[in-house]
Image: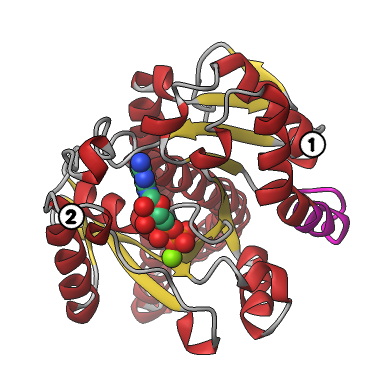
Amino acid sequence: MAKTKFTMIGMTSSGKSCYITAMYMKMAVGMDAFTLTTDEDTRKKLERDIRTLREPIGVSRFPSATQNNEESIRKYEFQLNKDRKEIITFEMMDYAGGALVDYGAVYDEVKQSIEESTALYIFIDGKSLCSDDPEERRENVYYDCAMTITPLLQEFANSHEGALPPVVFVITKSDLCKHFVSDSELTALVKELFSPAFSDNTISYMCAISLGDDISEDEYKGRFRPINVHLPFFLGCYHEYVAQYQILKADVEDSNWQLEKEKRQALNAAEKENKKFFIFKNDEFINARREAAKTAKKFIDENNNLVDATKKMATIFGKRLEQESDSFKCFKNGVEQGEFRAFEL
Ligand SMILES: Nc1nc2c(ncn2[C@@H]2O[C@H](COP(=O)(O)OP(=O)(O)O)[C@@H](O)[C@H]2O)c(=O)[nH]1
Ligand SMILES: [Mg+2]
């Protein structure tokens, strides 16, 4: 199946590396019969990081900060499998958040990755929201994140006739910030500071995640128990399948139309030949035409199966997200939806 990209956009320390680790942890063993696999070296690294995250040893449990240099880009290639079959391969790039402000080579790579992405994840550092003063909360998100990221969104939209891929706002460290900010304040803040993602013809989401509700307790000796980390990923997969379905359906309609025509012509030719008086009849020709019709039919069936399989995947992800709709917010054209509803396909 096609390779796709999900891009995380986030400043230093916003929680990107921890997110990849926790998401892998949750998905590796399986969820709804989905499992996530990766190459052996990456798996070893992630497993090591997960073990360390589980240790109640204070802040040294977290993966060390990603250095900002050209070698610092780490491309994770994951395969999502269902029922023991690989269904989708996707790439997620981790990099030092500092790259977004120095406009160097890594910055160019991030921009390129954004170009090729099915979904964008904007990481908002929950720590920015940990202040008793609402004005300060707003300023923190503004300077720590929006000031750099919103222009990137706008630039992307400008070069794509106003279009943006679905954007998922990932609010990290919800264990910390939930004590400071309400749902409604957060929604208003994100809508104000990232307005391109809430304009006409956009779909966006907001999801608060955490490595554990009490992970920071007793100087970060609390339990590692990730919350909601699969949701941004499932949203990306859902949109990937919806997009694939829409493209495939259009392609298949064209191609099947042509194949149906070929099939009809082949059968007609065979039929016509078959009506001839037997001494003039060319059996080889008839068989060849009937074979051609069979082949066309086989291609039509294969096309239809592919469309059905893609639709089935979109439906599975859509249903799962509908069930968990309480745990994230969905916006269409900037308007908050009461709940997530999968598209009618
Ligand atoms: N309380 C809390 N702290 C977190 C959480 N996730 C990350 N952190 C902290 O944020 C720091 C930066 O996270 P990291 O994933 O390295 O950020 P990155 O620079 O965007 O990759 C970590 O070292 C942790 O101290 C979380 O869910 N809860
Ligand atoms: Mg990092």
- Between 84 and 35, the one lying in front of the other is 35
- Between 150 and 233, the one lying in front of the other is 150
Q: Residue furthest top?
A: 338
The quadrant of the image that shows the N terminus is bottom left
Q: Is residue 266 above or below residue 172?
A: below
Q: Residues within 10 Å of mark 2 (few under 14, many from 20)?
A: some
* Residue type at the position of mark 1: Ser
Q: Which label number is shown at residue 47? A: none
Q: Residue at x 25, y 43 (%)?
A: 219
Which quadrant holds residue 106?
A: bottom right
Which quadrant holds residue 20?
A: bottom left
Q: Residue at x 18, y 39 (%)?
A: 222
Horizontally, residue 340 falls left or right of residue 286, namely right
Q: Is residue 178 above or below residue 154?
A: above
From mark 2 to mark 1, how far is it between C-alphas? 35 Å
Q: Residues within 10 Å of mark 1 (few under 14, many from 20)?
A: some
Q: Residue furthest bottom?
A: 71
Q: Residue at x 82, y 52 (%)?
A: 154
* Residue type at the position of mark 2: Ala
Q: Residue at x 66, y 75 (%)?
A: 107
Looking at the image, is mark 2 or mark 1 nearer the viewer? 1
Q: Is residue 98 above or below residue 81?
A: below
2 and 1 marks in contact (CB < 8 Å): no
**Residue assigned mark 2:** 28
> Which contiguous range is marked in magenta?
151-163
Task: Point out the tag, 2 or 1, that comes first from the N-terminus.
Answer: 2
**Residue assigned mark 1:** 195
Q: Circle 1 — which element?
A: helix
**Which percent across, then down, holds residue 136?**
69, 32
